Image: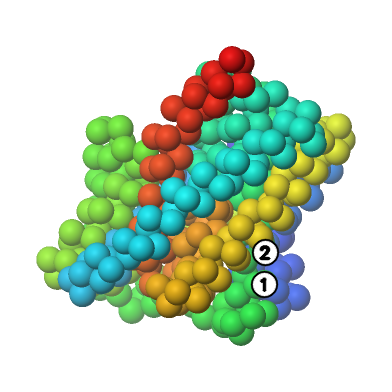
């Protein structure tokens, strides 16, 4: 409990500093940086998985509440860009696996699951089962998520002059209590139902689906208030930063350095795909960047909500990416590994 309180205080200091310096997304980036530096300094930080999952459910409800019939109809037209997601995942694997193996000397299992842009827990589970280095996988994926999440706000602000200081929703006091209770219902029930059927990303996709049903039926008429979105940013940012607790200088020199180099590759690939899609006039450039950036699903949802992007477009592409990686990665790893051994 003491470690948890210390972590909250450090994350809160990060928020205050970012506010004082007028830096973008203080509730998300402040906790990330504060907890990152504290972890590297050897402070005993700790996150809370239950609270983090609950915050992800807030984001799920926020996305689901934006769904309309017109939005669903527009999703049919997304198929050209959705088809490019498996292509991008394949490109990431073809470049990433040799990068980790030949440049940094990781074994095949660690290299393969470090390169795959899937969810952290899924890649750790698959990588451990394949005999990979779980600690290296954890640091590499945590760094991938952190770098993408930190870089994108500055790119959005510098290139598109996006105002990231806008509140992500209406104040709680302006929303009817019945609507707030309905959001809580969608968050808890959607999460638990999705978890019961074994859905991947249950804490965010379950509430998203249930809230979307409620919104399409006209029952849910608001998305979660600004205070709830800020709270979700705070806990998600804190969780990203605490992934570095216990990291050694050797791991910084090898695992984190390898991850930083890989992040540059990912950013370049993202811009290439975004530019191709833009030139083909298939989607708007900002939405494309958010949809194809291989960051964490929850973190990309936060950014899309704040900048007012097309939520259906962004979320559909991230869900497909995770789906492709979870279903395809183990099969491709076995085929690739078998080919290398033959």
Residue 220 occupies which quadrant of the picture?
A: bottom left
Above/below status of 324 relative to 284: above
**Whether residue 61 can be seen here:** no
Front residue of 127/175: it is: 127
- The quadrant the C terminus occupies is top right
Q: What residue is drawn where x is 47% and y is 69%?
A: 277
Above/below status of 282 relative to 328: below
Q: Is disc 2 placed on a helix, strand or loop?
A: helix
Q: Residues within 10 Å of mark 2 (few under 14, many from 20)?
A: few
Front residue of 198/62: it is: 198
Q: What residue is drawn where x is 47% and y is 62%?
A: 291
Front residue of 11/53: it is: 53
Question: Could you say where residue 62 lies in the image, as x and y percent from the top left?
Answer: 35, 63
Q: Is disc 1 placed on a helix, strand or loop?
A: helix
Query: Which residue corresponds to mark 2?
Result: 151
Q: Residues within 10 Å of mark 1 (few under 14, many from 20)?
A: some
Q: What residue is drawn where x is 24% and y is 39%?
A: 193
Above/below status of 229 relative to 235: below
Judged from this view, the residue extending furthest toward the left is 217
Residue 103 occupies which quadrant of the picture?
A: top right
| Left or right relative to 107: residue 337 | left
Query: Which residue corresponds to mark 1?
Result: 154
């Amino acid at each position: 409990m003491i470690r948890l309180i210390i972590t909250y205080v450090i994350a809160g200091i990060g928020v205050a500093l970012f506010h004082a310096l007028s830096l973008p997304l203080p509730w998300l980036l402040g906790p990330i940086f504060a907890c990152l530096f504290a972890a590297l300094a050897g402070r005993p930080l700790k996150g809370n998985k239950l609270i983090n999952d609950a915050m992800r459910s807030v984001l799920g409800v926020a996305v689901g509440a934006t769904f309309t019939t017109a939005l669903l109809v527009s999703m049919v037209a997304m198929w050209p860009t959705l088809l490019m997601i498996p292509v991008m995942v394949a490109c990431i694997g073809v470049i990433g696996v040799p990068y980790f193996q030949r440049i940094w000397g990781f074994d095949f299992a660690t290299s393969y699951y470090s390169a795959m842009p899937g969810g952290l827990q899924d890649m750790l589970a698959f990588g451990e089962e394949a005999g990979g280095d779980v600690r290296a996988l954890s640091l590499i994926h945590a760094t991938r998520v952190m770098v993408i999440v930190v870089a994108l706000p500055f790119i959005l602000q510098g290139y598109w002059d996006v105002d990231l200081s806008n509140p992500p929703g209406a104040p709680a006091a302006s929303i009817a209590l019945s609507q707030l209770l309905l959001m809580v219902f969608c968050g808890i029930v959607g999460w638990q139902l999705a978890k019961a059927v074994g859905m991947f990303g249950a804490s965010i996709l379950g509430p998203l689906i249930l809230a979307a049903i409620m919104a399409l039926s006209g029952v849910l008429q608001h998305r979660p208030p600004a205070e709830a979105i800020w709270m979700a940013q705070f806990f998600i940012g804190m969780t990203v930063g605490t992934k570095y607790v216990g990291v050694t200088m050797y791991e910084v020199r090898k695992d984190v350095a390898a991850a930083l180099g890989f992040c540059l590759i990912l950013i370049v690939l993202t811009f290439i795909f975004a530019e191709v899609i833009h030139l083909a006039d298939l989607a708007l450039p900002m939405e494309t960047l958010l949809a194809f950036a291989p960051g964490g699903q929850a973190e990309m949802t936060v950014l899309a909500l704040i900048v007012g992007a097309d939520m259906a477009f962004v979320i559909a592409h991230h869900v497909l990416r995770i789906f492709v990686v979870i279903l395809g990665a183990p099969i491709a790893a076995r085929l690739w590994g078998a080919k290398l051994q033959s």
